[in-house]
Image (cartoon, grey):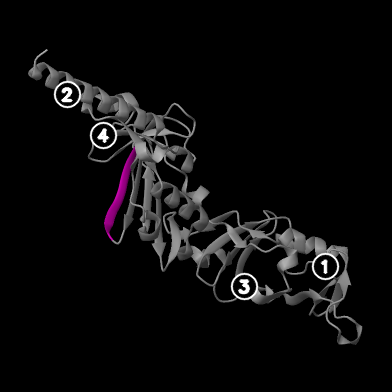
Amino acid sequence: MGNRQLVVLAAVLAGLVAVYAWQQHRRNASPRELTAALAPADLARRADKLVAWAPADPKGARLRLFKQEGRWRVDRGFPAPAKAARVEEVLEALAALRGEARAADPGLVGRFRLKSREAFHVEVRGGGERLLHLLVGKQGPDWDTCYVRAAGSDAVYLADRNVLGLFEVWQVPAKGSPDPKDWTELTVIGEGRRGVRAVAWRSAEGAWRIAPAAAPGGGGATQAKGGPAWVYTYEGPPRRRAAGARVRDFLDRLFPLQAADVEDPAKAAAFGLGAGAAELRVDLGAKGEVRLEVGRRAGEARKAWVRTADGTVYRLEGDWVPRLPAPF
């Protein structure tokens, strides 16, 4: 065998060894080595706007989330408080998103339901810059995976997270955009009765206060099973008091204070908010005091409208609403 043949055989053998080594590396490599990052690692920190939509939505609706004065808001036709923890969770999940390349042929995009019209779109911006515009297609082979591509690219990746699930969209192709109400923060006061120190009401109809009963000799609040012994005092006239389980039951109905929905602040006057409105003050101890302006109350419908210090108008509903002017 000549030297030339030996050189050729050696080259072939070296090539086979290299291919084998590469295959073994892929077989033993970690998922992170085999995947590529699909979003900037600092996405969550830089983001100040997130938009998600399904072009197939017949209403043309979009979920729009944005930061205003450092707080996340959701577009309800007006800025409304957004569930900040949920927004941050989604942004962190997007920042950590990785994918394995599956195709790069424009003709194959449709197989993964990643054409622009049928895909689900997620766009994140920060400082006026587009940080991410992801098109999300059909679900992958596992429940928690899906096929994605970046806007303007034909490269298809199998993402390691079900992006649709982050937005609670379960139909592929998506027929509707996420409901902004699901992203609206409706918690007015998150503390339960045990976190409340006192509650006071004042209106043209009268005033009352609920506070722990003072212990004899001035030794703090009188304790009862389940917390302090609450006392209700109507400042009248006529002046009257109530105590015990009835008062605790009323507080348990009131707190945590959850709204049914938000309203357009520009229509506050129509809800009786402004001059002549009642006031509900809630002392949360070390967490400070919350003051709510209380407007019109629809007794039969058990509805009331309140405005917080930041101008948010909430609609409250509950069987306790008609009792607000005089609970007992």
Identify the amino acid type marked 4: Ala
Q: CA distance from mark 4 to mark 3?
A: 52 Å
- What SS does tag 2 mark? helix
**Mark earlier in primary sequence (4, 2):** 2
Q: Which of marks 2 and 3 precedes in the sequence?
A: 2
Q: Nearer the viewer, mark 2 or mark 1?
A: 2
Rounded to the nearest whole Å, what is the CA distance between mark 2 and mark 1?
Answer: 83 Å
* Residue 98 shown left or right of residue 214 in the figure: left
Disc 2 target residue? 11
Find residue 313 and report its horizontal and vertical position in percent.
Answer: 53, 63
Which mark, residue 227?
1
**Numbered circle sitting on residue 155:** 4
Q: Is residue 187 visible?
A: yes
Residue at 86% x, 74% y is 241
In what element is the residue under mark 1?
strand
- Which numbered disc, 2 or 1, marks the residue that appears first in the sequence? 2
The answer to whether residue 42 is above or below residue 150 is below
Which type of secondary structure does the marked residue at label 3 adopt? strand
Amino acid type assigned to the residue bearing label 3 in the image? Val
Amino acid type of the residue tagged 2 in the rendering: Ala
| Residue for badge 3 | 290
Q: Is residue 143 left or right of residue 11?
A: right
Q: Classify residue 209 as left or right of residue 306.
A: right
Residue at x 26% of width, y 34% of height: 155
